[in-house]
Amino acid sequence: MITEQHIPEAYRDLLDRPVVVSLATINPDGQPQVTPVWCDYDGEYVRVNSSGGRRKVKNMKTRPQVTVLAIDPKDHYRWMEVQGVVEEVIENQDEAVAHINKLSNEYDGRPDFFSNKPGQRGEQRIIFKIRTTRVVANG
């Protein structure tokens, strides 16, 4: 098992390829709230994109401590837990929509996230930039 402050190079692929990760946030009552999400890593931040109004959005805006768990779909004994703090919230719609379209292309092969969700077109998108504080990796 490896414990570091930064993403180990040997595990970076879990954030560079389309692996659905579990995002844990903290509810107002202290109970963890976990959601499967798409994410990417820009070399400095783990970035998560969400529509506004979701529980995880409210949680991250008021309690920025989060954990992202990535499990290798090809080897379930290989995983990485990224603990961190939301350091920046981007609500600029041009940037947030471009980011969700990038993720959609990587995860679903669709360059337009809203192409199969026409009822959601125009919804507010938000990017959360997570600064890593501790990483535990195994396998």
Image (cartoon, helix red, strand yellow):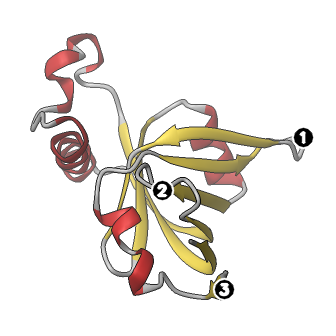
Q: Is residue 137 above or below residue 47?
A: below
- Horizontally, residue 55 falls left or right of residue 21, namely right
Residue at x-position 46% and y-position 42%: 37
The answer to which of 67 and 87 lies nearer the viewer is: 67
Of discs 3 and 1, which sits in the foreground? 3
The amino acid sitting under disc 2 is Asp
How many numbered discs?
3
The Cα–Cα distance between marks 3 and 2, rounded to whole angstroms, is: 19 Å
Q: Tell me the quarter of the image containing the C terminus.
A: bottom right
Q: In this image, 27 relative to 3: left or right?
A: right
- The residue that disc 3 covers is 3
Which of the two labelled residues, at mark 2 and mark 1, occupies the earlier sequence position? Answer: 1
Label of residue 29 in the image: 1
Residue toward you, 45 or 134: 134
Q: CA distance from mark 2 to mark 1?
A: 35 Å
Label at residue 75: 2
Q: In the image, what residue type sits under mark 1?
A: Asp
